[in-house]
Image (cartoon, rainbow, N blue to C red):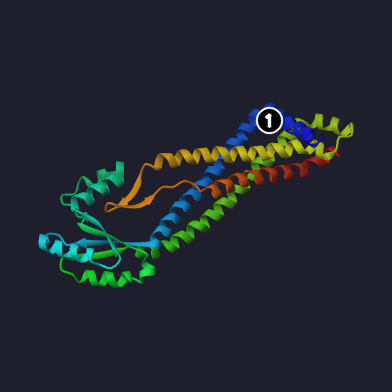
Amino acid sequence: MTLRLWARYFKHALTNISTNRMIHAISVGTISISMVLFGAFVLFFVNINNLVMEWGRSTSMSVYLKDGIEKDTRQRIESALRNLPGAEFKGFISKEKAMSDLMETLGPQSGVLAGLTKNPLPASFEIVFKDVQQLQLDPRKIKEELEKMEGVDEVQYSEQWLERFEAVIYMIKLVGLVVGGLLSVAVLFIITNTIKLAIYSRRDEIEIYKLVGATDWFVKAPFLIEGAMQGIIGALFALFILYGMYWLFSFKTIRISGLPLMEIVFLPNGHMIFMLTLGLVLGLMGSFVAIGRFFRFFD
């Protein structure tokens, strides 16, 4: 009996969606846009967080060389780097290769470099220290020792950037929470008003149901299902759009001086489930608000 009753609820909900398909299509589209904006913040934060975690597990170091150093000097520096405890030598990046990587990263904006008469980028060696904490390595001390070597101009390591990123990550979290809250309110408002319109369009039918003794749940359940379906479908569309954005950008790896800096990843399963659940919850909440405000006219 219960399954037959739920089948009837779903049938009524689908019939109403079909009857008012334009209103529901606009509602789902608006919900999808709102969820895409929220999901884009989440996707951006997930990738930034992965970057920070990767930097936390290892320390990359760029050893920039002075212009015009002798080949023997460069070889001595390379030999010293290869013999550093816990260091994994990644290779040498020439001035030309550094400029080529920068132009590739800039893409269409690389034309701003066309006016340069001289390549200002230095050549460098790239090394990575794995398990920094386990080996009890001090990147700052290693940096100071390397900068004393002949032919070394400057040394930079990833933890320096990590320290600068902490404040940025905090701001991203704060902005994401604020934007997510505002967008959730917007989705709630959209669903509430769509259900209101559905109620108004069927008020004669609802009055008849009430006159013949239909229970409140029998009348209200289809509207709750409509709201839930709007929220879930909007979230699904948003995930498809976000995946399309990810697919477009996933072919690119952001690089600095030839080293991979960040590989784009998509939302983990838990985050996707959260977005779908958020759509469902907002849909149900919007329906409850609309029902609570307007069904008293039919009592």
Residue drawn 50% across the image and 38% down it = 241
Residue drawn 10% across the image and 62% down it = 72
Pick the quarter of the image with the C terminus.
top right
Q: Secondary structure at mark 1?
A: helix
Quadrant location of residue 48? Answer: bottom left
Q: Is residue 30 left or right of residue 110?
A: right
Residue 68 place in picture, x, y as percent: 11, 59
Residue 270 place in picture, x, y as percent: 55, 50
Residue 225 place in picture, x, y as percent: 71, 38
- The residue that mark 1 highlights is 17
Residue drawn 66% across the image and 37% down it = 229
| Residue nearest the observer in this picture, 296 or 54 | 54
| Residue nearest the observer in this picture, 254 or 81 | 81
- The amino acid pointed to by label 1 is Ile
Q: Is residue 156 left or right of residue 250?
A: left
The crowding category of the residue bearing disc 1, from other C-alpha atoms within 10 Å (few below 14, some 14 to 19, many at least 20), is: some
Quadrant location of residue 82? Answer: bottom left
Q: Is residue 200 left or right of residue 213?
A: left
Q: Is residue 31 visible?
A: no
